[in-house]
Amino acid sequence: MRVLPRQLDQPLLRPAVEPGVGAHALASPEQQATAPAFSGSTGPEEADSYVERHTMADTAKPKGGGTTRSTGGRRRSRKDSPSNIADEQPKVLLEYYRQMLLIRRFEERTGQAYTQARIGGYCHLNLGEEATIVGLMTALQERDYLFTNYRDHGYAIGKGMSPRSVMAELYGRSTGAAKGWGGSMHMYDTETRMLGGYGIVGGQLPLATGAALAISYRGGDEVVMCQMGDGTTNIGAWHESLNIASLWNLPVIFVVINNYTGMGTPVEASSAEPELYKRGSAFRIEGVRVDGRDVLAVRDAAANLVERARSEQRPFLLEATSYRMKGHSVVDPAKYRTKEQVEEARSNDPITAFEATLEKAGILTEEAKQEIADSVREEVADAAEFAENSPHPEVSTLFDYTYATPVANESRRMPADPVFAE
């Protein structure tokens, strides 16, 4: 049996601090006298300390060494250009573009169907986060597990679920991923190992950590990816899950999608440390920040952490900075955003940027662009038609999936049934 807790003689990683004076604050006076000064020009392979790995991994770090804390304008310093595509296969790049466009059109159709009352309940869209989704999902192997929050449609499709089954679930039809009983926030598919879709903020963290514990206990080589929003980093489940994942060396990647606004509250107003990738340092978990607009940067950062979690059997934290194109949900008009902030989100559209990059490189021609657009449009229309023509679940099946296995004395009383049998 594998020993899960960290061994007493295992060296511990130092918590993250800012480079410069603070970087040597943890060392003894003798160590400080002989320690070299931190240099940002050092390559990742030369970074032996957690301090160096932690700060150098930031690909979306504000210029000038500052933080993301806003002084009113909220303009976010970003990487000025996308990743180098010279070494990428054109076919792969076009597939990334198609996946991003598919998620965008799918979510647009979802928003339309919601206003037409074809979709009920809560509904949260991935508009603006397509590059992050495709990059993350590309980094996972088929055998790896995924847990997400309620903004899960794009992740479900990216993990391999059929757009038909996702749309049918949104419509509440029996052909949906959860037989029509889950809805927008509860996508689930054991075949693709997409294990939810959770409506409670942070509800997925303990479960993802438990799945990683099961993998470690059995000696498997799968990895768990646990996606969440920036607001989740302020709740108890965040601290509890990261703490036990670090104590027990569990193969889980905690991914924070930082779109700068937890519902209507700016990150700077809710987190004393707005650079969220540093918040794993309290648990000695290495953190990385990446530009969520850049599908290749996200893919490379995520793939590196996934394979390290697989080989080193320990957790990591990835923060992807992104923009939410709409409000928190489809019924949120986002009145809390200024005109400047709305324009900022629009000007950082990841699909528009990637499209321009591919066109400039001669990879995406007008003919290919139109062909992809038509193919995506047909696929989304097919998913909507399939959902529209699928049957509603039978009322008699309401309790069929309450428990995975039969439970003694399980109540199956319908709302209109008497409390006590006559």
Image (cartoon, grey):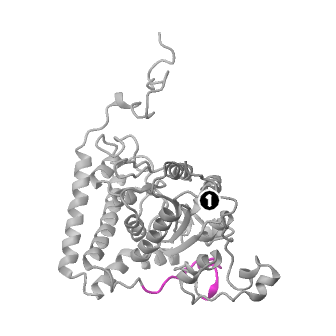
Q: Is residue 352 left or right of residue 28?
A: left
Q: Is residue 100 left or right of residue 1?
A: left
* Foreground residue among 243 and 335: 243
Residue interval drawn in magenta? 64-81
**In the image, what residue occupies the spot 46% across and 86% down?**
80
Residue 220 seen in the current view: yes
Residue bearing mark 1: 246
Q: Position of residue 205 (x, y in %)?
A: 55, 53
Marks counted in the figure total: 1
Looking at the image, is 389 positioned above or below residue 150?
above
Residue farthest toward the right in the current orientation of the protein: 29
**Quadrant of residue 355 in the image?**
bottom left
* Foreground residue among 143 and 195: 143
Q: Position of residue 408 (x, y in %)?
A: 49, 22
Q: Is residue 52 left or right of residue 398?
A: right
| 263 is within the stretch colored magenta | no
In terms of secondary structure, what is the magenta stretch mainly?
loop
Type of residue at label 1?
Ser
Q: Is residue 386 left or right of residue 179?
A: left
Q: Residues within 10 Å of mark 1 (few under 14, many from 20)?
A: many
**In the image, what residue occupies the spot 17% across and 79% down?**
367
